[in-house]
Image (cartoon, rainbow, N blue to C red):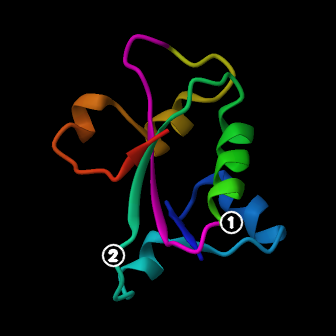
């Protein structure tokens, strides 16, 4: 089943080239199914590579999964651009009121 990610997440292109079924937010809006909502705290220094590895694994499930990426506010990432972090990651304060099915 597909994993739902942001339309412009860099891992999207890599996964599509590997024939992993990725569903963008735009396409997911037209679906009539409730995805499993998962938030991932990525503490690894190589964020984009780690995102791709995690999403590749999650795509092997028969469930549709909606993924959110979480960052700590006390750490400044050194190996990925600030633009990437602002575009794709949220802090705990930003997601506090959300309901997730799991965290990894």
Q: Position of residue 91 (x, y in %)?
A: 33, 30
Residue 84 found in image quarter: top right
Most prominent secondary structure in the magenta stretch?
loop
26 up-or-down from 18: above or below: below
Q: Is residue 7 toward the left or the right of residue 20 in the image?
A: left
Which image quadrant: the N terminus?
bottom right
The residues tagged by marks 1 and 2 sit, at their Cα atoms, a distance apart of 18 Å
Q: Is residue 102 toward the left or the right of residue 7 in the image?
A: left
Q: Within 10 Å of the Cα at label 2, are there few (<14), some (14-19), or many (20+) other Cα atoms?
A: few
In the rendered structure, does residue 62 fall within the stretch colored magenta?
yes
68 or 8: which is nearer to us?
68
**Circle 2 sits on which residue?**
34
Q: Within 10 Å of the Cα at label 1, are there few (<14), some (14-19), or many (20+) other Cα atoms?
A: few
Q: Which mark is residue 60?
A: 1
Q: From this viewpoint, which residue is outermost toward the left? A: 97
31 up-or-down from 7: above or below: below
Look at the image and give the residue range highlighted in magenta. 61-75
Q: From this viewpoint, which residue is outermost toward the front? A: 62
Q: Position of residue 8 (x, y in %)?
A: 57, 59
Q: From this viewpoint, which residue is outermost toward the top? A: 74
Task: Please give the name of the residue rendered at 61% of the width and 67% of the height, measured from the top-left corner.
Answer: 61
In the rendered structure, does residue 95 fall within the stretch colored magenta?
no
Ranked by sequence position, the earlier of labels 1 and 2 is: 2
Secondary element at image label 1: loop
Residue 96 found in image quarter: top left
35 up-or-down from 92: above or below: below
13 or 83: which is nearer to us?
13
Q: Position of residue 34 (x, y in %)?
A: 33, 75
Task: Please give the name of the residue rendered at 37% of the width and 18% of the height, measured from the top-left corner.
Answer: 73
């Amino acid at each position: 089943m597909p994993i739902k990610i942001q339309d412009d997440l860099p891992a999207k292109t890599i996964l599509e080239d590997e024939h992993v079924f990725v569903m963008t937010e735009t396409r997911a809006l037209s679906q009539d199914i409730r995805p499993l909502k998962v938030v991932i705290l990525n503490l690894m220094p190589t964020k984009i590579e780690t995102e791709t590895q995690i999403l590749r694994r999650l795509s092997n499930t028969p469930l549709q999964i909606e993924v959110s990426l979480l960052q700590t506010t006390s750490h400044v990432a050194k190996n990925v651009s600030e633009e990437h972090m602002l575009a794709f990651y949220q802090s705990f304060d930003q997601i506090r009121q959300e309901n997730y099915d799991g965290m990894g």
